[in-house]
Amino acid sequence: MTPAGDNLDSQNLATESVFAANFCLPLIRTAQNPDGGWGFQPGLRSRVESTCWAVLALRAQESSASLSDIPARGLEFLRKAQLADGSWPASAEVNSGSWVTALACWVLAADARTRDAVAAGVKWICNDWPRDSATWRRWRARLFSPRKITEHNDSYRGWGWTPRTSSWVEPTSFALIVLASTPAQILPKSAARRRQLARRMLYDRMCPGGGWNCGNPMVYGVPGEPLIVPTVWALLALRDAPKRPEFVMSLDWLERNIGKARGAGSLALARIGMEVAGRKWPQGAPTIAEMYGRNEFLQNIAVASWVCLAARQRHSWLTGNVAEFS
Amino acid sequence: MRRPDIALVPSFQRAASRVVIRRTANYQQDLAAVIYEALAVFDLPVKGKTVLLKPNLVGFDPLCEMNTHPYVIAAARESFLRLGAAQVLIGDGPAMDRDTEAILESVRLREFTGPLGANFVDLNLDDVKRVALRTRASRLKELYLPKTVLGVDFLVSMPKLKTHHWAGVTLSLKNMFGIVPGGCYGWPKNVLHWAGIDNSILDINAASRPDFAIVDGIVGMEGNGPIQGTPKPSGVLVLGDDPVAVDATCCRVMGLRPEKVKYLNAAGTLLGHLDAAKIQQLGERVESVRTRFAVLDEFKELREPQGGVWN
């Protein structure tokens, strides 16, 4: 990119930063519930997932000491929401763990006082095997299924949205991100093997031509259409191998498709993915502020949080590095 | 508040159902007039009530090939307001893509219904309530369902007329998968696949049976639906107060045998009428609008015979 392009890019980022500070941070701050957590939208009951995104966004954005109580109360909500088996539920009404366990571990890993909670969560993650890739299931499918519906390799195993179901791209990416940033002392022995299998699973599930959808790259021989959100999470999970052809192809796909983004969530995550991978933001891409004018992000706290995270120049929040948050 | 006890009624105790078929050549017609006129037949109890329209918003779809067309959604909304509804909400929980805003923008819903902030409910993200399942078709014993769905006075399922590569067809009953929240079950809602798609459809509809169905069959989808199939112009809107009867009629319009669709056949025992003799057909006759839909080989037994020969 030319220096002029660099300027354009930094201007764009500055605009997005101002927008995040003026619109998204106030939305997040005022939407915090009395229990310390956040619902997916203002006025809704606190959930682990929306609370995780809000805390990540606030920690990455806020420098004023007077505001530090808000993420702290969010962390307290997360600590209290953990189940006895070490997992976190998607909703307080649910009594079993889910993909949000990885998100909670990710957020809490920055705090040394929650080391035990994170260790229990990571152990739960490593013990949670998807059922579809069990050996006997694969053999049964091979023997009795009249026609192969999908073409991916079921011996590679990641993580599902809920326990004992199938591997999917986003929960697998979340688990990989948290396992990569968890201190080695508290990682279970199985973590290395799980990471290896999960990485293979993500590479195998890439759509033909690059990018990921939820995890079905081909159904009945028809290629699936990649989506921005799972593509970015997979790229972030695999970012330590940036020269792999799958990574490069998928990043290229992302760059080509940013102009087609219609949701602020997709656009914000695309910016994070591009920046972490060292790519410049394409000229003429839509801006997040334009999108806000349409539907105000449907008041989605996760989207507002991703916009705040995208407005950062450094992305150490990805590794749970607390240094930038202080 | 809707009454869940009227969802499950043995077929022999249930009064005949009414289904209206309207020939509708394209989306440029005055759809609000067509739908309002058709709704008037039913004398629906919506005056002063909150109505939730549940369209089928499957994914990013600028050509409106896989989603319920926004013209139809907007026309239904206008019609229920004309019938005196105090509030008409639109809500869905897309299954494969968590960027609901992108899906809504791709079909330009906002341009037809006005700002979505106060009118649209993302059912993936709504507060939930535990619902103990009254049926045991699947292994699921309970579901967490959106409070909005459970709290409205009148629920309208608004699918698109499509074949489905795992369930055979996706119509007003299958469309109810969209009320199961991704915020609890993920994207996709894989728990339902593990519990069995056909059986999950039955349990979900027993827990929250739509009060009415409006099917967008103006352009449907055949073959490898619900996403990767081929658009199929069919030129109909199908409406009714019994989702099973509406779906059965849609199958007949598609040249398919409803009794061969597993979940629909089972739904005919407790959730509504499958038998054509128990369905009062209004508007167009099925034969006059029949448009044969292609299905995957896995579902070839669904096809109605043509001239005594199975095609």
Image (cartoon, grey):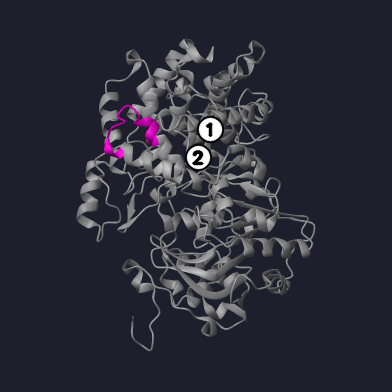
Viewed as shown, does residue B196 lie left or right of B42? left
Subunit under mark 2: A
Which residue is label 1 attached to? A8
Magenta residue check for A237? yes
Quick one: quadrant of the N terminus of chain A?
Answer: top left
Task: Look at the image and tell me whether residue A296 can be seen.
Answer: yes
Which labelled disc corresponds to residue B189?
A: none
Which residue is label 2 attached to? A283
In the rendered view, tell whether residue B111 sits above or below residue A110. Answer: below
Q: Residue B227, how many percent across, how many down? A: 44, 59
- Report crowding for label 1: few under 14, some 14 to 19, many 20 or more residues within 10 A (C-alpha): some
Q: Residue A113, how many percent across, how many down? A: 48, 10
Q: Earlier in the sequence, mark 2 or mark 1?
A: 1
What is the C-alpha distance between the residues marked 2 and 1? 8 Å
Task: Look at the image and tell me whether residue B46 can be seen.
Answer: no
In the rendered view, tell whether residue B308 sits above or below residue A119. Answer: below
Q: Nearer the viewer, residue A114 or B15?
A: A114
Q: Secondary structure at mark 1?
A: helix
Question: Do labels 2 and 1 touch, CB within 8 Å?
Answer: yes
Q: Nearer the viewer, residue B196 or A20?
A: A20
What residue span does the magenta drawing correspond to?
A234-246
Subunit under mark 1: A
Q: Residue A254, how many percent across, how many down? A: 42, 41
Query: For the residue marked with disc 2, what is the amino acid?
Result: Gln
Q: Secondary structure at mark 2?
A: loop
Q: Residue at x 38, y 26 (%)?
A: A124
